[in-house]
Amino acid sequence: MDSFNVGNGDATISFSTTINTIGLARTRGIVFNPETTEIIFTCHSEDASGSIFESPMGNAGKLQNKRLSVFTEINLELLGTFKERENEFKRIDAFYFLKREKEAPREFGTTDNKEASDDFKTVMILKEIDLVP
């Protein structure tokens, strides 16, 4: 699992993601306390790209020792054959960005977990990032 140093104080931390697919996608990001499951922040994609535009998650002090979990579901049913869907599954990637106020965003690689249904009509991606002080 990846981690991101949020730092201390009042600096605003922002999140965004880019999903690369020709399928129909939707994404939801959740920041929570892994010990209590208390939800701190949520965001979601606003169109069928699955991408989330830069969203402020809160200040660094509030986000310390929390976890960001990002779930993406991609529908490939509109693609023709099994082989076309399988090829698109292999091509799909996702990029996740966390940014501390006035700093360049840090990019996190594709996925911790990318799974497809047996017929490659549905793809699920999970990315988890621990937010450390």
Image: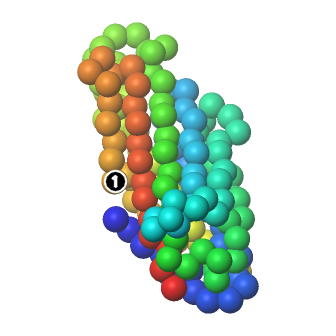
Q: Percent from the top left, x then y, of residue 48?
A: 63, 31
Between residue 121 and residue 82, name the one nearer to us: 121
Residue 65 visible at all = yes
- Could you tell me which residue is drawn at 68 percent across and 89 percent down? 9
Question: Is the residue 122 above or below the residue 3 in the image?
Answer: above
Q: Percent from the top left, x then y, of residue 66?
A: 52, 70
* Residue furthest to the front: 36
Q: Secondary structure at mark 1?
A: loop
Question: Is the residue 64 above or below the residue 35 in the image?
Answer: below
Q: Percent from the top left, x then y, of residue 44?
A: 65, 45
Question: Is the residue 86 above or below the residue 72 in the image?
Answer: above
- Could you tell me which residue is drawn at 45 percent across and 15 percent down? 77
- Could you tell me which residue is drawn at 40 percent across and 10 percent down? 80
Between residue 109 and residue 73, name the one nearer to us: 73
Between residue 124 and residue 35, name the one nearer to us: 35
Tell me: 44 left or right of 114.
Answer: right
State the residue position of label 1: 112
* Residue furthest to the bottom: 8
Tell me: 33 left or right of 15.
Answer: left
Between residue 40 and residue 21, name the one nearer to us: 40
Tell me: 105 left or right of 55.
Answer: left
Q: Percent from the top left, x then y, of residue 129?
A: 45, 65
Q: Pointer 1: residues within 10 angstroms few (<14), some, or many (20+)?
A: few
Quarter of the image for the N terminus: give it.
bottom left
- Could you tell me which residue is drawn at 69 percent across and 77 percent down? 59
